[in-house]
Amino acid sequence: FVIPDFPSFTKGIEHIYWNCKSNSQGRLATYIPQLARVNPDQWGVSVCTIDGQRFGIGDNRVPFTMQSCSKPLTYAIALERLGQERVHQYVGQEPSGRNFNELVLDHNKKPHNPMVNAGGILVCSMLKDLVKPEQTLAEKFDFTLNYYKRLAGGEKLGFNNAVFLSEREAADRNYAIGHYMREHGCYPEKPADLRELLDYYFQCCSMESNCEAMSVIAATLANGGICPTTEEKVLLPETTRDVLSLLHSCGMYDYSGQFAFRVGLPAKSGVSGAMLVVVPNVMGICVWSPPLDPMGNSCRGVQFCEELVGEFNLHRYDNL
Ligand code: GLN
């Protein structure tokens, strides 16, 4: 086993879980009205090691939408299908130093990275127009959902239509980003109608999962792309390497630098309060608690990661 004494490890996780439970900081995302309707007290944690040991506590089976946690997954699909070089013709690798939904491009007029909204929308346009362009929108949705499902070893993955509709109704900012990128010729193929592209992006954000299934996704990334529960080779090791590199530097929005410093693990947050956390070659973790800090990261989620690293020396540079 990669974690020889799993029971004492999970005891430690449980302890941190209860510490974070009393954290009442943060606010729900309200710009997507449907996200403001969830119960803010919900708090779940799941762990899946690369050799398939599992642990979950709290609201670990309650469904939530992935939001930006979908971005590393769509980015991974793009890398698999198009290769690193092609993908990065259109999107950069630098942290933006700005909010996740900022109307901003880098000096080359590319989105800064695939983990902020501009980059996420651009990666969706690549999947839409460069990967199997003959697919209908329905087929594209199924193709994406099935990929996510394989990453999760076939566990809970669905779609939340209410959140999708709610986000689509309140999408001025993402439309502005979409138009801005069209003005600057960012897309591989100029979209005649941005609605289709943004619908696809919102569909990815509205994929619904839970901590258990998302911990398997994180574990697949921790395991070089091989799903630990099904042993299916879902991603190439080089894809996984690229995804983890950018999660390390850009996964936590404008907290990414501090997170890399304090926690030292690749992670991705979403405005639903979800967080994927990867301990390479060891395990995947998913934590979920809806209240967010001003940067858009889950308050309890960030606290959990900081305490986790304090307790178990999992920071990438702990063992030098
Ligand atoms: N669907 C959200 C948006 O585009 C995703 C952003 C996030 O999770 N930070 O605004």
Image: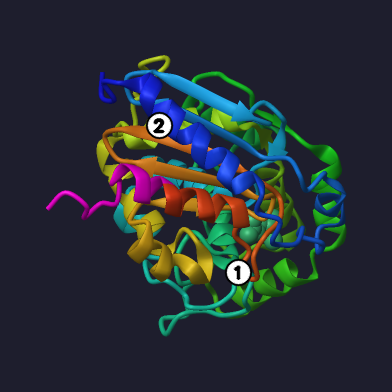
Expressed as whole percent of the image width and height from the top left, the position of residue 50 reads 33, 25
The label shown at residue 154 is none
Magenta segment includes 202: no
Measured in 3D between alpha carbons, the distance from the residue under mark 1 to the one under mark 2, in whole angstroms, is: 26 Å
Q: In front here: 1 or 269?
A: 1
Q: Nearer the viewer, residue 288 or 223?
A: 288
Residue 194 in picture, x, y percent from top left = 72, 62
Q: Residue at x 78, y 37 (%)?
A: 160
Q: Give the residue displayed 82% in from the left and 44% down from the top.
A: 39
Q: Which mark is residue 219?
A: 2
Residue for point 52% across, 66% down: 253
Which disc, if any, is residue 295?
1
Q: Amino acid at mark 1?
A: Met
Look at 29% across and 51% down and name the residue there: 315
Is residue 311 located in the magenta-colored stretch of the structure?
yes
Magenta span: chief secondary structure: loop
Left or right of 236, for residue 132: right
Judge whether residue 126 can be spotted in this image: no
Q: Tell me if residue 100 can be seen.
A: yes
Chain part drawn in magenta:
308-320
Image quadrant of ligand 1? bottom right
